[in-house]
Amino acid sequence: MGQSAKVLSILIPAWNEAATIAELLRRVLSVDLSHLNVAIEVVLCDDGSSDATATIARRMQASHPALVVVEHGRNQGKGAAVRTALDHARGELVLIQDADLEYGVEEYGELVAAALNGAQVVYGSRFLRRRYPTGMQLANYLGNRLLTWLANTLFSLHITDEATCLKLFNTRLLRSLGLRCRGFEFCPEVNARLGLLAVPIVEVPVEYRARSKAQGKKVSWRDALQAVWVMGSAYAGSRLRQPLPLPDVAGSASRAEPANGLGLQ
């Protein structure tokens, strides 16, 4: 790769994923984006796991210089783990990847290509390739449809998958949003902030195979209610404030000051 190669930081929040973390890291670390002149680094934040997740990740780190492992002393939630991983990212682009095996790595190139073509935010949609994603439970399907409709309605978005894990961002833009999420409200908070700033979101189709509760799926109906609350609060708060101009995301991926006045305090 040339000297002008960009770096993609893949952020992996992980909590009690000992059963899948080694295979997931093997797949992610094998991704080759050299044809796009993009190098990768992987930043895994172990969110206070009580199993061997951190031990396995540390063992793999010893033989993979592109892997960075950071740890929370106690469980704080997915959003907190994403934010900690973001603090350690050095790439101009960041991509969120869950620690399970529901999402593959095969579409990384398409997400990155869209970003290199000018998109500041790219989502991997589970609903563009097929109407009903493989293995998704009816309750999760209906929840996804509701949250996507709500995000589009409240914030004038045009997306098909509000809660997708695979979200790629310009690093400086993501840092400028001043995220406060700690749990699964990462997605609704990000969508609300992007919508209030009128940042376009590009989507590409991705493959998805849902896992069951027995296999370790952690999201529940309570998280859907929290997502509704987060988006509703953001919308209500924004009615009392003047809209902000789009942040300047040109330049390096250095940490930026959080944006204020978005209705999420």
Image: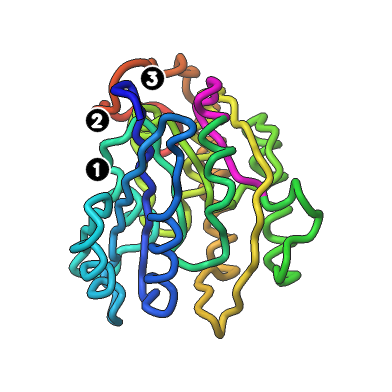
Q: Is residue 232 left or right of residue 18?
A: right
Picture layout, residue 215 above or below residue 195:
below
* Residue under numbered circle 3: 249
- Residue 87 numbered mark, or none: 1
- Residue 88 position within the rendered picture, expressed as x and y whole percent measured from the top left: 23, 44
Q: Position of residue 215 (x, y in %)?
A: 54, 81
Q: Quadrant of the C terminus?
A: top left
Q: Is residue 169 magenta?
A: no
SS assignment at label 2 = loop
Instruction: Please report contact status of discs 3 and 1: CB closer than 8 Å, yes or no.
Output: no
The reply to whether the C-beta atoms of the residues labelled 2 and 1 are less than 8 Å apart is: yes
Magenta range: 114-125
Q: Secondary structure at mark 1?
A: helix
Residue type at the position of mark 1: Asp
Crowding near pointer 3: few (<14 within 10 Å), some, many (20+)? Answer: some
Q: Amino acid at mark 2?
A: Arg
Q: Which residue is more in the foreground, 1 or 121? A: 1
